[in-house]
C-alpha cells in the first residue's frame, strides 16, 4: 500500500479547513461537497479521470489549452458522461507543442477563457476522487489557472497511475539484473504502461482520449496488483 512508503494526507480534514477558509463561492462549494470517507473501499469509489494538454510543461510560463474528463468505477467507464473543453491560453501557443497535441491557433480562436469553464469543471470534480497520470501537470496547472482568475488556488487528492506503475515496477524489478545491465528501467509513460496490461493503443496527446486511457489503466492496475477491497486512504496522495 502507498501509505507504507509515504505519510498519508488527511484529505478530509484539509477539505473541511478549506471549506471554512475559501473566500470564493465556487471553491467553497467544491470543498463543501467533501470526499469519500478515507475508509471507503476502492471498489466503491466514484473516480474522475482527468487529463490536460498544455502549451508547455512549465506551469509558471505555460497554460492549459484542453481538458478531458471521464467518470468511472473499477468495473465501468462512463463514456456517455465524458467531456472535453478547448481553452484559449493567455500565453502564446508554442509551435513545438502544436506538433505534439495537434491543437492549432485556429482551433483556439473561438475557445473560451478558463474563467468561463471553472464552474462546470469544479461541479464535475466535486465529490469524486481524481485520477491522473503524472499528477504535477493537473495539480499545478489547475491551481495556477484558477488562482490567476479568482485569486485563490485549489488542492485536491489524486490517484496517480504513473506513481502506481513506478511502485509496481520496483516491486517486480530484479535488482541483480539492474546492477549487471546498468540499472535500466521500464518506461512508465501512459502508452507503455498500458501495453503491459494488453490494453489497446490509443493516439496519445489528446486530452479526452488520455483521460479514458488513464481510467482503463487504473482498472488494470487494481485488477492485477492490488486488492479492490483496500481503503482509498491507501492510494490517494
Image (cartoon, rainbow, N blue to C red):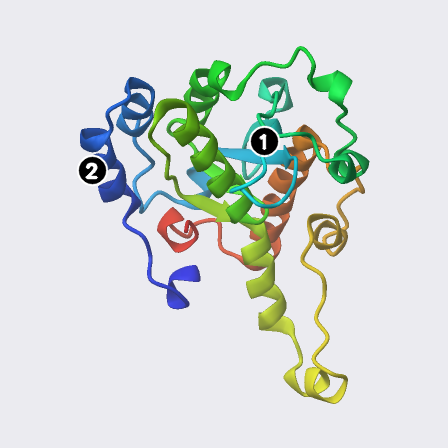
Residue 231 position, x and y percent, is 38, 50
Count the labels in the image. 2
User: 133 left or right of 34?
Assistant: right
Q: Quadrant of the N terminus?
A: bottom left
Q: Residue at x 57, y 36 (%)?
A: 75
Question: Viewer-nearest of labels 2 and 1?
Answer: 1
In depth, the one of 162 and 104 nearer the eye is 104
Q: Picture quarter containing residue 118? A: top left
In this rendered view, identify the residue nearer to me: 198 or 108: 108
Q: Nearer the viewer, residue 121 or 199?
A: 121
Estimate how packed mark 2 is, as few (under 14), some (14 to 19) or many (20 or more) residues with alpha carbons within 10 Å. Answer: few
Residue underneath mark 2: 17
Q: Is 98 placed above or below 182 here?
A: above
Q: Secondary structure at mark 2?
A: helix
Identify the residue position indicated by label 1 in the image: 64
Note whether residue 1 is visible: no
Give how far across and how far down residue 191 sits, in percent.
Answer: 74, 48
| Measured Cα–Cα span from mark 2 to mark 1 | 28 Å
Q: Kindly tell me whether residue 185 is visible in this rendering.
A: yes
As drawn, is 157 to the left or to the right of 190? Answer: left
**Nearer to us in this view, 9 or 99:** 99
Asked whether disc 2 touches disc 1, contact meaning CB atoms under 8 Å apart, the reply is no
Q: x and y percent of residue 53 in the render?
A: 65, 34
Does dot 1 land on a helix, a strand or a loop?
strand
Crowding at dot 1, Cα within 10 Å, few <14 / some 14-19 / many 20+, comes out as many
Disc marking residue 187:
none
Name the residue rendered at 72%, 50% in the picture.
194
Amino acid at each position: 500500500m502507498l501509505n507504507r512508503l509515504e505519510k498519508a494526507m488527511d484529505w478530509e480534514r484539509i477539505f473541511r479547513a478549506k471549506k471554512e477558509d475559501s473566500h470564493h463561492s465556487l471553491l467553497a462549494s467544491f470543498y463543501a461537497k467533501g470526499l469519500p470517507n478515507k475508509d471507503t473501499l476502492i471498489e466503491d469509489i466514484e473516480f474522475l479521470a482527468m487529463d490536460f494538454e498544455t502549451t508547455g510543461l512549465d506551469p509558471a510560463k505555460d497554460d492549459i489549452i484542453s481538458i478531458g474528463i471521464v467518470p468511472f468505477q473499477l468495473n465501468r467507464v462512463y463514456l456517455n458522461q465524458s467531456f472535453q473543453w478547448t481553452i484559449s491560453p493567455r500565453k502564446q501557443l508554442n509551435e513545438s507543442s502544436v506538433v505534439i497535441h495537434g491543437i492549432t491557433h485556429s482551433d483556439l480562436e473561438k475557445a473560451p477563457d478558463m474563467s468561463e469553464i471553472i464552474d462546470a469543471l469544479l461541479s464535475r470534480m466535486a465529490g469524486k476522487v481524481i485520477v491522473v497520470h503524472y499528477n504535477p501537470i493537473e495539480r499545478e496547472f489547475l491551481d495556477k489557472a484558477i488562482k490567476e482568475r479568482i485569486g485563490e488556488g485549489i488542492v485536491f487528492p489524486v490517484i496517480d497511475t504513473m506513481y502506481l506503475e513506478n511502485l509496481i515496477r520496483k516491486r517486480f524489478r530484479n535488482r541483480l539484473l539492474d546492477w549487471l545491465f546498468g540499472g535500466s528501467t521500464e518506461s512508465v509513460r501512459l502508452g507503455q504502461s498500458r501495453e503491459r496490461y494488453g490494453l489497446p493503443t490509443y493516439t496519445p496527446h489528446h486530452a479526452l482520449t488520455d483521460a479514458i486511457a488513464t481510467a482503463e489503466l487504473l482498472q488494470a492496475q487494481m485488477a492485477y496488483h492490488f486488492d479492490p477491497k483496500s481503503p482509498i486512504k491507501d492510494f490517494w496522495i
